[in-house]
Image (tube, rainbow, N blue to C red):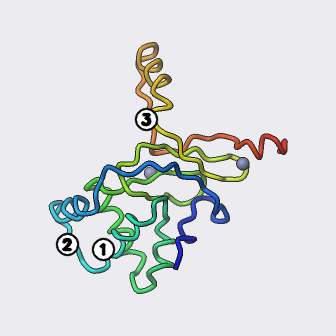
Amino acid sequence: MGWSWVTTYPVDVTAAREPAVPSVLAFDDAVRRVRDGGGRLTTARRQLLEDLNAAGGRVTAEGLAERHPDIDLATIYRSLSHFEEVGVIEHVHLGHGPAAYRWAGVPTIAAVCADCGIVTDIPAAELDGLAERLSDEYGLRLELGHFALSVRCSRCVTSGV
Ligand SMILES: [Zn+2]
Ligand SMILES: [Zn+2]
């Protein structure tokens, strides 16, 4: 089975672009963190962890549930919550849809088109200059990662929607 279920928001967006930026978090380290964090690594949890690691992009709890009909949704949510607590995954809100999770340690942030919903990941370092100015001039710390940047993609701008 391919990874077509690894869609983001909205669900018909299959062309989400991910830059080839590898995570700095190795699978074995993630397993250790989950265990050290007091969570038992059940078969279900290991399967979910493997999926999140292999996905290379973002997945929703519902997407994981579709792929694992044998694991109930409550277990999936509890597992995701534990994984996030120990820092092996992170979630982002891409719009009005459900939270989307991905493997931690990828230094990119999501930019979601307000019209068509396509998600483009851009290197977080692109915003260093802005972050610095906000900090220096206004005493504000730019918090990226929890919410996607709202943008319009070139296709939507061109089509003049
Ligand atoms: Zn668009
Ligand atoms: Zn959130």
Q: Earlier in the sequence, mark 1 or mark 3?
A: 1
Which residue sits furthest right? 160
For the residue marked with disc 2, what is the amino acid?
Answer: Arg
**Compared to 124, does 14 lie above or below?**
below
Which residue sits furthest front? 20
**Quick check: is the Cβ at mark 1 less than 8 Å away from ligand 2?**
no
**135 sits left or right of 112 in the view:** left
Q: Which residue is mark 3?
A: 143
**Quick check: is the Cβ at mark 2 less than 8 Å away from ligand 2?**
no
x then y, percent, for residue 100: 49, 58
Q: Quadrant of the C terminus?
A: top right
Q: Which residue is mark 2?
A: 40
Classify mark 1: helix, strand or loop: helix
x then y, percent, for residue 76: 38, 72
Which residue does the image show at 41% across and 66% down from the upper left? 54
- C-alpha separation, residue under disc 1 versus residue under disc 3: 30 Å
x then y, percent, for residue 108: 46, 43
Which residue does the image show at 52% across and 51% down from the upper left? 93
Q: Earlier in the sequence, mark 1 or mark 2?
A: 2
- C-alpha separation, residue under disc 1 versus residue under disc 2: 8 Å
**51 sits left or right of 3 in the view:** left
